[in-house]
Image (spheres, rainbow, N blue to C red):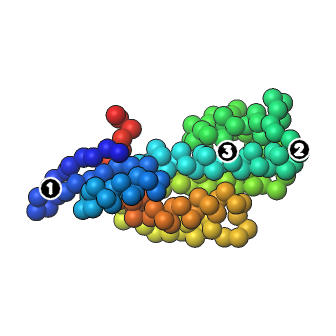
Amino acid sequence: MDRRSTRGVGGRRRVGDARPLRPYRKAFDDSLPDATQVADPFHVVKLANSKLDECRRRVQNETLGHRARRDDPLYRSRRLLTKARDRLDDKGNAKLLGFLEAGDPHGEVRMTWRAKGTLRGFYAQPADEAEGFLAALTAHAVVPSMPTEVRSLGRTLRRWRDQILAWHEAKVSNGPT
């Protein structure tokens, strides 16, 4: 947990940056009840990557009936899946799409990958559009037709809505530490 103070109108305002996990939230509530809690963007996207990996492993197991092996398409895609869409060159994008085509018959991993990319895009939104963007993202994520992991991510984003939105005002992260 990283505590920072910033100047606000009328004095000092305490801002705290944390991972989106219940123990961190409880620590803030108990020790700094008046501080603005901000969910660290790194950890929010990391959570989405974890859900993506859970989905990849589940689909792999359901499709092939075993844990990942070196030559399995979804296993080979794991590093590419964690990269941001805009950081994939044409070759990497084609490779990833080929792996998904070969190993993701119902498109569940692809849907989870898109949800992660959309969540990353949230942090590029202007502050006045962020709330609507997050509301639309969470509403879409919890639809029953979405993979289990996306629905779980959507519920977590709803629970941490205020802390995630607070990033647009505070712009704090413990990334530089």
Q: Residue furthest front?
A: 30
Q: Position of residue 98 (x, y in %)?
A: 79, 40
Q: Is residue 151 above or below residue 62?
A: below
Vertical comparison of 88 with 60: above or below:
above
What whole-number distance in Å separates the C-alpha atoms at marks 3 and 2?
Answer: 16 Å
Instruction: Identify residue for label 1.
Output: 12
**Residue 53: which numbered mark, if any?**
3
Q: Secondary structure at mark 1?
A: strand
What amino acid type should be assigned to the residue bearing mark 2?
Leu
Label 3 SS: helix
Point out residue 145 in the picture as x, y percentages from the top left corner. Answer: 73, 68
As drawn, 30 above or below 55: below
Q: Name which residue type carries label 3.
A: Asp
How many marks the image carries: the answer is: 3
Front residue of this view, candidates 24 and 73: 24
Q: Return the disc, 3 or 2, that comes first in the chain's sequence.
A: 3
Could you say where residue 29 lies in the image, as x and y percent from the top left? 33, 60
Determine the image quadrant of residue 111: bottom right
Residue bearing mark 2: 64
